[in-house]
Image (cartoon, helix red, strand yellow):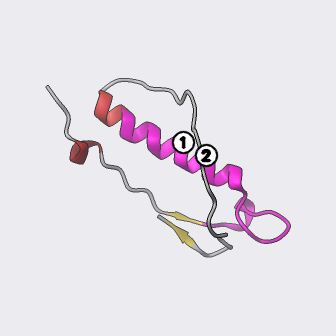
Amino acid sequence: MEVSVEQSKTIQTRLVLPSDTNHLGTIFGGTVLAYIDEIAAISAMRHARKAVVTVSIDKVDFISSAKVGDILK
């Protein structure tokens, strides 16, 4: 049975907490990458209907910062 893209669509919302931030008060890039990896895995598992692992991420550009209290979606 084929899985449509809509069936594997996954949306995650996160609140930036003080424990997520660096000395400048902005979220660590590594934390954002962990969120990306987690939500990508969930979407891929829904699509593949089996366990998956991340092999690589080719490129990520951080275009703005997020501060405590910001909502990431």
Q: Which contiguous range is marked in magenta?
A: 16-44
The 10 Å Cα crowd at callout 1, few under 14, some 14 to 19, many 20 or more, is some
SS assignment at label 1: helix
Per the image, the residue denoted by label 1 is: 37
Counting from the top left corner in percent of width and height, residue 67 is at 68, 73
Residue 33 in the figure: left or right of residue 10: right
Residue 24 in the figure: left or right of residue 67: right
Counting from the top left corner in percent of width and height, residue 60 is at 60, 50
Q: Amino acid under label 2?
A: Ala
Is 24 situated above or below 61? Answer: below
Q: Amino acid under label 1?
A: Asp
- The residue at 59%/74% (across/down) is 70
SS assignment at label 2: helix
Counting from the top left corner in percent of width and height, residue 49 is at 30, 27
- The residue at 66%/66% (across/down) is 17
Per the image, the residue denoted by label 2 is: 34
Are circles 1 and 2 on residues that touch, CB within 8 Å?
yes
